[in-house]
Image (spheres, grey):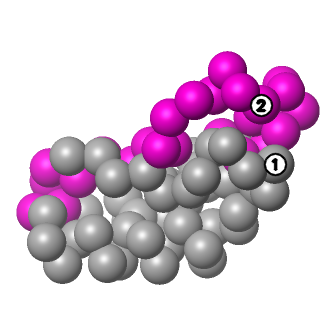
Amino acid sequence: MGPGVYDIHSPRAPDSDAMQIVIDEAQKYIPIERLWINPDCGLKTRNWEEVRQQLRNMVEMTKIVRKKYVA
C-alpha cells in the first residue's frame, strides 16, 4: 500500500521531516514490508522544477526509512 507522503498539487516541497510523520503514522497500520513511499498523485499538475525537488526529498526520505525499518 502506498499512502501519499505529500500533496503533489501543492507547490511546496515538503522536507524529509514532514514526510517522516506520514510514514511513521502509516507504518502503525501497514506492515513495513508492504508500505510503498510515493507522492499522492498528479505529477503532471506541477512544473519540472517543483517536481524534481519534491521527488528528491521523497527519495531521500525513502533511503532514511529503509535504514530505520529494514535492518
- The CA distance from mark 2 to mark 1 is 7 Å
Residue 69 visible within the image = no
Which dot marks residue 11? Answer: 1
User: Residue 53 location, x and y as percent?
Assistant: 79, 44
Q: Is residue 45 left or right of residue 35?
A: right
Which picture quadrant has residue 69?
A: bottom left
Q: Quadrant of the C terminus?
A: bottom left
Which dot marks residue 46? Answer: 2
Q: Which residues are magenta?
A: 31-55
Q: Amino acid at mark 1?
A: Pro
The answer to whether 38 is drawn above or below residue 51 in the figure is below
User: Residue 6 location, x and y as percent?
Assistant: 56, 56
Which secondary structure, mark 2?
loop
Q: Please tell me which of labels 2 and 1 falls first in the chain.
A: 1
Which picture quadrant has residue 49?
A: top right
Q: Amino acid at mark 2?
A: Arg
The answer to whether 41 is drawn above or below residue 12 in the figure is above
User: Are discs 2 and 1 less than 8 Å apart at CB?
Assistant: yes
Which secondary structure, mark 1?
loop
Q: Is residue 11 left or right of residue 21?
A: right
Q: Is residue 20 left or right of residue 67?
A: right
